[in-house]
Image: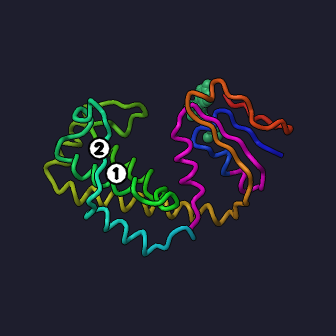
Amino acid sequence: MKIFDPFAGYGTVGLVCRVYGYDYELWDLNPMIEIIHKSAILRKSDIKIQNLIELLEEIKKSQKQFIPKWSNLNYWFPEEFLPVLSKAWGFVHSLPENIKYFFLIPLLKTTRYFSFADEKVHKLYKSKYSRKKIKNLLKGNWETAFYKMLREEVFKLYNKICEYEKLKPKQVNFKIKSGIDTLETQLSSSARIHQIYKT
Ligand SMILES: C[S@@+](CC[C@H](N)C(=O)[O-])C[C@H]1O[C@@H](n2cnc3c(N)ncnc32)[C@H](O)[C@@H]1O
């Protein structure tokens, strides 16, 4: 049996399929599904905990830099944070694929917290709360707070991976399609598909 979720969101259906040993195909308009799913199916054995700790230290000293080409970067981030953010993203982008996914979502969450965006609101929104949050961060030792939050998020993800592994997920075949193309995509298999429709 192959399971198809055309509006897969975070890809929960795929994770459950692995537990039951079913092949699956996930689509979502939001390209983030690919990163979320790759992070969710990491294995504990992909990295030693000691390596995670070492990498979290290396980020602080990294010489690599990455700054997105956004015209409105200063609208979303205070200038003071940019060197630290650019170093962290430069470092994570330079990691090999299998290790990178231990850091991407944690760094994304941390970056969002250290931005003018209100992380309590689903859409990108600069609120009264988020302006106050940044003002308070800038008053204190925000750099230490940044690395502390990143470390906590990395270990939160690692613990979730360990928890998922206890459910003994199986090796199955799967496909993920994301982005605007899903509006015109045809299912890749002619096999009998049990479609899951959700409202
Ligand atoms: C309620 S969530 C899905 C939850 C998911 N099925 C689960 O089990 O966790 C709905 C998803 O549909 C996606 N979506 C909406 N319209 C779409 C379209 N035309 N094609 C693909 N995905 C779409 C949205 O990006 C959103 O992630």
| Numbered disc 2: secondary structure | loop
Kindly check if marks 2 and 1 are in contact, taking CB atoms under 8 A apart as contact.
Answer: yes
Report the residue at 62% width, 44% height from top: 11
Q: Does the magenta stretch include residue 1?
A: no
Few, some or many C-alpha atoms within 10 Å of disc 2 (few <14, some 14-19, many ≥20)? few
Report the residue at 52% width, 47% height from top: 35
Where 181 falls versus 138 (above or below)? above
Ligand 1 within 8 A of label 1's CB?
Answer: no
Report the residue at 78% width, 34% height from top: 195
Few, some or many C-alpha atoms within 10 Å of disc 1 (few <14, some 14-19, many ≥20)? many
Where 170 falls versus 12 (above or below)? below
Residue found at the far top of this picture:
184
Q: Who is closer to the viewer here, 6 or 34?
A: 34
CA separation in Å, label 2 and label 1: 8 Å
| Numbered disc 1: secondary structure | helix
The amino acid type of the residue labelled 2 equals: Ile
Count every numbered label the image shows and give the total. Answer: 2
Residue 88: percent from the left, percent from the top?
A: 31, 55
- The residue that mark 1 highlights is 89
The amino acid type of the residue labelled 1 equals: Trp
Q: Does the magenta stretch include residue 33?
A: yes
Q: On residue 63, which mark appears? A: none
Residue 62: percent from the left, percent from the top?
A: 28, 61
Ligand 1 within 8 A of label 2's CB?
Answer: no
Where 75 falls versus 171 (above or below)? above
Residue 4 quadrant? top right
User: Quarter holding the C terminus?
Assistant: top right
Residue range of the region highlighted in magenta in the rendering? 16-44
Report the residue at 68% width, 28% height from top: 185
Q: On residue 67, which mark appears? A: 2
Residue 170: percent from the left, percent from the top?
A: 73, 60
Residue found at the far right of this picture:
192
